[in-house]
C-alpha cells in the first residue's frame, strides 16, 4: 500500500547484447528441433523413403560427380558406385507397392511387354537414372535450358550458345539447392533447379518419356500422388460429387468428366482457345477431318416471314386484331 492505494513494484535487470544473442540462438535451435519433430511426426515413413529416390535436387547433386573432358563424360569408379546404389533399396520397396495396385496389376496382366513386376525394380530405376544422365549431360529432349533458373528467375540463356561441362553444388541462404554451372565457353553461372519443369518433361517430352519408359512414369505418377496435399484429393472428389448431382452418367463417364473439368481452365480465362473451338465448330477443318456444323438458326427459305410479318403470321394476327369486348379494354393496354 502506498498512501492508502495499491501499487505494483516491478523489478527488472538490464539485458546485455550477449544475453540477446544467447536467447536468439536458443530460439533458432528450438525452432529447428520443433520443425524436425513435426516433420518426423506428420510425414509417413513411405514418403520419406520416396525422397531418397524422387528428390530431384538430390538426384542432380549425385550427378555433379560427372564432368566432360574432351567431349566425353567422365566419372570416378567410387562416384559411379555411389550413383548406382543411391535409393535402390527404397525404390525396390516402393516399386513392390506400385506393382500391387489393382489397376497396375491389371495392366501388367494385359500387356506382358511391360516390366511391372517387383523383380524389375532395378531395371526400371536404372532406366530412370540413365534418362536423368542423358537429360543433363547429353541434351536428351533439348530441354536443359528450361531446367535451371538464375537469380532473376529467368532461364539460363548460356545453354543456347555453349555446352555444360561442370555442375557443382554451392551453399546459399535459400531453401532451394543452388548449383554452379560451367560452360565450355568459359562462362560460369549460378542457378537453381526448376523441379516443376523437370517433372513436366516426363509427361510432355516424347524423347524423355520413351527413354524413361512407361513403367517409370507409372511409378512417378504414384509417387507424386503419394506426396501430394490431401486437400487436392478432397477437391477432386468434391468436383466429382458436383458432376454426380446431374445424374444419369456411369462411373466411367463421371470420372472422364471430372478429369476434363479438373484439368481444363475456366472458358472465360482462355478466350483465344474458345474462339478457335468455335471456328472449328462452325467452319470445320479439312486437315483434321472435322466437318462444319449447321448453325442453330432456322428460317423460311422463301423468306416470306421476313418480308410480311414482324414475328410470324399467328403472332402478328393476335397482336393486331381487335378484342372481343373493346368497350372493356383500355386503349393504352
Image (cartoon, rainbow, N blue to C red):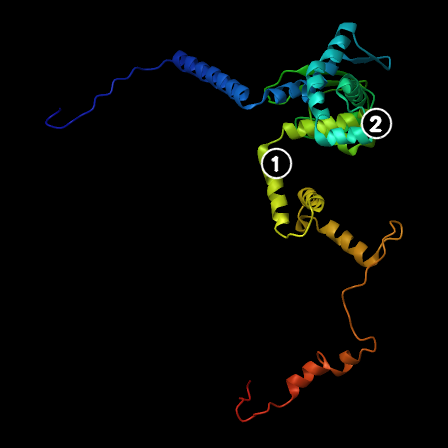
Whether residue 157 is visible:
no
> What is the x, y in percent for residue 57?
68, 21
In the picture, residue 93 is in which quadrant?
top right
Q: Where in the figure is residue 241, as x and y percent of width and height?
A: 61, 45
Q: Which residue is mark 1?
A: 233
Crowding at label 2, few (<14), some or many (≥20) Cα neighbours within 10 Å? few
Q: Quadrant of residue 13?
A: top left
Pointers 2 and 1 in contact (CB under 8 A)?
no
Q: Secondary structure at mark 1?
A: helix
The residue at 67%/29% (across/down) is 224
Direction bottom: furthest residue: 327
Q: Which residue occupies the foreground of this view, 112 or 95?
A: 112
* Position of residue 313 in the picture relative to residue 1 (left or right): right
Quarter of the image with the C terminus is bottom right
The secondary structure type at the circle numbered 2 is loop
Which disc is residue 306 wearing? Answer: none
User: Residue 320's spot in the image, x, y percent?
Assistant: 65, 87
Gap between marks 2 and 1, in whole Å?
A: 31 Å
The N terminus lies in which quarter of the figure? top left
Q: Nearer the viewer, residue 237 or 139?
A: 237
**In the image: residue 32, left or right of residue 77:** left
- Residue drawn 70% across the image and 14% down it: 89
Foreground residue among 124 and 253:
253
Amino acid at each position: 500500500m502506498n498512501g492508502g492505494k495499491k501499487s505494483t513494484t516491478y523489478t527488472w535487470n538490464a539485458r546485455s547484447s550477449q544475453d540477446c544473442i544467447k536467447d536468439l540462438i536458443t530460439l533458432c535451435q528450438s525452432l529447428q528441433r520443433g520443425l524436425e519433430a513435426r516433420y518426423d511426426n506428420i510425414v509417413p515413413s513411405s514418403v520419406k523413403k520416396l525422397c531418397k529416390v524422387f528428390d530431384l535436387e538430390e538426384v542432380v547433386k549425385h550427378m555433379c560427380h560427372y564432368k566432360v573432358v574432351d567431349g566425353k563424360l567422365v566419372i570416378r569408379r567410387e562416384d559411379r558406385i555411389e550413383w548406382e546404389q543411391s535409393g535402390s533399396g527404397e525404390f525396390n520397396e516402393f516399386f513392390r507397392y506400385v506393382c500391387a495396385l489393382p489397376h497396375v496389376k491389371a495392366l501388367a496382366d494385359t500387356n506382358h511387354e511391360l516390366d511391372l513386376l517387383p523383380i524389375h525394380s532395378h531395371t526400371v530405376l536404372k532406366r530412370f537414372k540413365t534418362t536423368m544422365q542423358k537429360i543433363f549431360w547429353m541434351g536428351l529432349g533439348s530441354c536443359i535450358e528450361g531446367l535451371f533458373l538464375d537469380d532473376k528467375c529467368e532461364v539460363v540463356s548460356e545453354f543456347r550458345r555453349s555446352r555444360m561441362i561442370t555442375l557443382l553444388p554451392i551453399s546459399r541462404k535459400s531453401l532451394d539447392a543452388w548449383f554452379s554451372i560451367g560452360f565450355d565457353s568459359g562462362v560460369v553461372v549460378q542457378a537453381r533447379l526448376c523441379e516443376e519443369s523437370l517433372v513436366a518433361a516426363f509427361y510432355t517430352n516424347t524423347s524423355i518419356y520413351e527413354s524413361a519408359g512407361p513403367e517409370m512414369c507409372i511409378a512417378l505418377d504414384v509417387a507424386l500422388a503419394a506426396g501430394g496435399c490431401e486437400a487436392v484429393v478432397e477437391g477432386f472428389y468434391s468436383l466429382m460429387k458436383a458432376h454426380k448431382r446431374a445424374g444419369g452418367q456411369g462411373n466411367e463417364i463421371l470420372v472422364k468428366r471430372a478429369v476434363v473439368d479438373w484439368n481444363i481452365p475456366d472458358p472465360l480465362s482462355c478466350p483465344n482457345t474458345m474462339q478457335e473451338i468455335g471456328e472449328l465448330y462452325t467452319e470445320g477443318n479439312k486437315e483434321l477431318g472435322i466437318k462444319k456444323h449447321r448453325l442453330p438458326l432456322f428460317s423460311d427459305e422463301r423468306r416470306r416471314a421476313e418480308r410480311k410479318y414482324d414475328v410470324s403470321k399467328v403472332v402478328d394476327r393476335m397482336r393486331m386484331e381487335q378484342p372481343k369486348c373493346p368497350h372493356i379494354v383500355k386503349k393504352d393496354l
